Each structure stands twice: as C-alpha cells, then as structure tokens.
Amino acid sequence: MLEAIVLWNEPNNLSHWNFCLDPGWQRFADMVMYASSTIRSINAGLPIVLGGVSACDCDFLRLMSNLGVLDHVDVVGVHGFPLDWNHWSIDDWPSKIEEAAQVSGKPVWVLEAGASSFGAEEVAAFGLKRTLDLLRRKVDRIHWYSLLDLPATWPAETRHKEAEGSSYYRHFYLGLIKEDGQPKLSYKNFPRDGSVGICQWFHFEDPRLDRAVQELKNLNVKYIRTGLSWADFYRPNAISWFDRMLNALEPFDVSLTLCFTPGHLGIESHHTSPPRESAHFAEFAAWAINRYASCDQRPTSDLQKEVGLHE
C-alpha cells in the first residue's frame, strides 16, 4: 500500500536535478507545487513528501520555504551519508534533524541514511548501529540505504562516474547484502522489530525484485521507499513493469518517489533536466496516483493523522 508520495529525489544534487538549467530552483518549485495540487485533487489524504534533500541541507529547505514549496507538502525528506560523502560528523544527525524541522515546520523523514562497506564491513556495521542510535525517537521514518549492493556492471546514478575516484565506488557497497547474495555484518545487526525501513531503488525490469522482497520479509521490514522513473514511463512494457514491482511490494507500506525527466520533455535531453513544462510532471503524477493510490483505495491511517493531513 502506498503510505506516501515523494516528489523527486535529491533536487539539490546535480546528479539528480540540473540546477545549472534552473539556478534559482524556481522551475523545480513550480513543478513540485503543480504536482502537489494535482495529487491533492485526486487523493487529498495521501501524504506528500518533499523529495530527499541531499546532506540534510537546511539552506536548501530555507530556499524551498521562500519559494512557497513547503506550503504544498506534508513532510520533508532528508538524506545523510556522513561516513562517505557529507561534510559533517555522524554525531551531527540529531542537530541536523532538529534544524530541518525548525526551518520547515514539518515532520522530517529520513528517506536515505547509509554507510558503505567499501573500505570494511565493520565501518558499515558501525554506521548502521550509530545512525539508528542517534535517530530513534527523532523521526517517524528511517529508511536505511540500502538492502542490496549495486552490481559492479551497473552504473551508479551520478554524473562524473569513475572520475569521482573512491567516492564513485562507494555507491556499489551500500547494501546489507553483497552482489553474490551473501549477508554482511550490517545485515546481521539490522533490527528485526519493524521499526526501521529500507530504501531500495529498482532498475527497469530489475531481476533482483523477487529476491529483494523475500529478504525484506526475512528482515521483518514493514515500510520501504522506492521509485517510479518518469523517464522509464515511455519505454516499452513500462506499465507492466511498474505494476509488477508495486504488486510485489504490496505487503509493505511504500513511500513512492516520482523522479527523472524523459529526455523528450526536458529542457535538455537528459533525465536530470528540468521539464520544459511543469504540467508534464503533474500529468505523470496524476497517472501514478490514479493507478496506485486513488482515494477509494486508501483509508485514513494513524500516520496521516500524525502529519496533520486534512480530510
């Protein structure tokens, strides 16, 4: 069941939104507000989350507030990888969450928090335990990133690839489970009480889907975050794949992220490009909500009440 819709992913990261084409993020703001209004007209009870802000960047949240975006969402999503990429200490997590809540005036969800085992599995295991110790009771949702390591032959979602050096290769070792299916130390330490969710992105027609679902059940995971690629929507068999993925994830509460621009609808032909028209993204959002979260499919939940949604 969809428990929330997430609008975009790391919009303050050039690997996910080309802000060189939108230097003040006005196009992004217009796109989110248009999509939010469209979603509300279809299912007013579905929580809308501002897509995970890279590095819990509160200056970006201030900009979104100034542009009116935060008036159109119910929750603010943040990401943090202090052991791998962010320029702050893992011990800063609580203060980062408090600042994000103060700046936004919204509940804060951690949509991605993780630690790579690139150097050593012990580092990732420490990162998991320490992160959860710091975030428990601070937020309603923690999505650990991720369940599965990225296969070595697949590209990581970043612009500069191998030119990033070890920063690039860290992308491949963020899972609880190795590419060969072997569990890591962090897998053994993952809590089995359902209190922590998983963020797992699936590639188009991802052959790992069924294995991932079984592993999520083995870990007693109750909620997950994943995404539908707007760019994939125009590929052959896209709807069949979307249906298959969301049917497989039906046992979990899903925060579904919509992101990535189809090349023919962007200012430039690239999935990180702002769309030429905000209405194009809103149309995709409307399609997704009508298909997977129309209002007659969703009773009002305790979580919806917690984030202060109107009926």
Image (tube, rainbow, N blue to C red):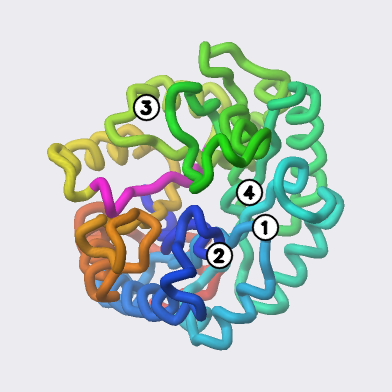
Local secondary structure at mark 2: loop
Local secondary structure at mark 3: helix
| Label 3: few (<14), some (14–19) or many (≥20) C-alpha neighbours in 10 Å | some
**Numbered mark located on residue 12 in the image:** 2
Q: Is residue 135 left or right of residue 147?
A: right
Principal SS element in the magenta part? strand
**Numbered mark located on residue 209 in the image:** 3
Against 193, residue 256 (above or below) is below
Residue at (61% x, 58% y) in the render: 54
| Label 4: few (<14), some (14–19) or many (≥20) C-alpha neighbours in 10 Å | many
Name the N-terminal-most of marks 2 and 3.
Answer: 2
User: Is residue 295 visible in this depiction of the protein?
Assistant: no
Distance from disc 1 to disc 4, alpha carbons, whole Å, reads 15 Å
Distance from disc 3 to disc 1, alpha carbons, whole Å, reads 28 Å
| Marks 3 and 1 in Cβ contact (< 8 Å) | no
Quarter occupied by residue 88? bottom right
User: Is residue 224 visible in this depiction of the protein?
Assistant: yes
| Marks 1 and 4 in Cβ contact (< 8 Å) | no
Name the N-terminal-most of marks 4 and 3.
Answer: 4
Q: Nearer the viewer, mark 2 or mark 3?
A: 2
Q: Which residue is mark 1?
A: 55
Q: Nearer the viewer, mark 4 or mark 3?
A: 3
Name the N-terminal-most of marks 1 and 4.
Answer: 1
The kind of residue tagged 3 is Leu
Residue 24 locus on image (x, y percent) = 51, 80
Distance from disc 4 to disc 2, alpha carbons, whole Å, reads 20 Å
The kind of residue tagged 2 is Asn
Residue at (57% x, 18% y) in the render: 178
| Marks 2 and 1 in Cβ contact (< 8 Å) | yes
The kind of residue tagged 4 is Ile
The kind of residue tagged 1 is Ala
